[in-house]
Amino acid sequence: MPAEALGLVTFPLPPTIVKIALNALLLSHSASYRSAGINQYIFELLTQLRLRPPEQSYEAFVTYEPTEICLSPTPNFRTTVLSSGFRKPSMRVVWEQLIQPLVLARRPPDLIHALGYALPLAWRGRSIMTICDLSFVRYPTLFNRSNAMYLATIARLSARKATTVLTISESTRRDVITLFGVAPDNVVTTYCGVSDRFQPAPETRIQAFRQGNQLPEEFFLYVGTIEPRKNVAGLVRAYARYRRDAENPLPLILAGGRGWKDQEVFDLVDQLGLGDNVRFPGFVPSDDLPLWYSAATAFVYPSHYEGFGLPVAEAMACGTPVITTTASSLPEVVGEAGKLVPPENEESLTSALSQIASDSDLRRRLSLAGRKQAARFRWERMAAETAAVYERLIKSPWRPRR
């Protein structure tokens, strides 16, 4: 079957020692929640793999033609562009389970890496899959029922089929072992990273940014999708109590794209009479994030569950004091460099808001500690560890699974 009939636009890739196919269909350019989380993991991994020595060659399947220089073709890296129709979830399933096996059969790689939750179940060769989190298993009621059921089913089948499962935190690794019954030796943690652009911005740039966006001198900041798992409603309730008790309460800015079941948050702000004290600037472009973090008095991330918690690490790298929760992976990311509260304890969150707002010495200590902690997480290290897993699997004895 010709490549065009499969919806591919492809170019020759010179043969090198090891060929690795990467399913990167979740890579997105959209200004919405789809460009956060797993999209960032995929983008950074591809960017770093492209820079690695040519002992391994990579072919990433995507649904748009990358325009970024950091994803341009090299002798050992290329992207193969599928029809834009495969961006739809239903069509993505068709690609992953029906078309992808045909493509792989035409030019078999040494290894495939599913950068999401689904391996092609018909593939019998070496395989890796990345599981960023299992929120759809831990908290299925926070998702569309059919989506949660499909994700849980395909992720479980894929994890048990994969030669190796990569996770982005020890917390998620434990979930994969416990919830999916995968052997511990087959699950490897490769932590996410923080890009160099996340660092404290110069005061002159911060002031210009505040003026351009009509921001106050001090404010609490949340950045993330507006959805139930992020516990934004809990933050709004805790913030309302904080405002009742504080002499000079700081405003709250809830930045991020709208997700699912998000209307509760907007309704709650109205019901509690918070009015202009809570602002919703909407989706924040990635290039602006360091300025948002740097301009904030403190970053608040009250999530019920995270596979890693990139915004927390990014905020710490910018020197912004962090308040987050004891849930899942967040203590791994924060260490002792932030204020941790149980996600269900809104009174503790209220207390943390008050303490951070009123104690400049505490903010200074957390700022310094946060920068040091965030420096532990580097995308280059994550990619190097991933490439090492590729190499180990390729060199290991192999017998195709039935």
Image: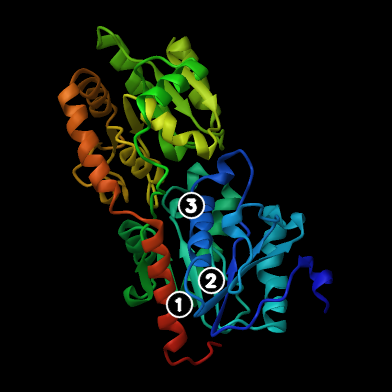
Q: Secondary structure at mark 1?
A: helix
Q: Could you tell me residue 251's position as x and y percent?
A: 38, 16
Q: Residue at 27% across / 23% down in the picture?
A: 353
Does 268 sit left or right of 30 as displayed? Answer: left
**Distance CA(mark 1)–CA(mark 3):** 28 Å
**Distance CA(mark 2)–CA(mark 3):** 21 Å
Task: Give the camera-side residue of 269 and 287.
Answer: 287
N-term mark: 1 or 3: 3
N-term mark: 2 or 3: 2
Classify mark 2: residues with Cα within 10 Å, few (<14), some (14-19) or many (20+).
many
Marks 1 and 2 in Cβ contact (< 8 Å): yes
- Residue highlighted by disc 2: 113
Q: Could you tell me residue 205's position as x and y percent?
A: 42, 26
Would you say residue 180 is visible in this rendering?
Answer: no
Mark 2 or 3: in front is 2
Q: Secondary structure at mark 3?
A: helix
Q: Secondary structure at mark 2?
A: strand
Q: Which mark is residue 141?
A: none
- Residue highlighted by disc 3: 136
Task: Give the camera-side residue of 210 and 138.
Answer: 210
Question: How many numbered marks appear?
Answer: 3
Q: Could you tell me residue 32's position as x and y percent?
A: 59, 39
Does 189 sit left or right of 132 as displayed? Answer: left
- Residue highlighted by disc 1: 390
Would you say residue 25 is visible in this rendering?
Answer: yes
N-term mark: 1 or 2: 2
What's the residue type where badge 3 is placed?
Phe
**Distance CA(mark 1)–CA(mark 2):** 9 Å
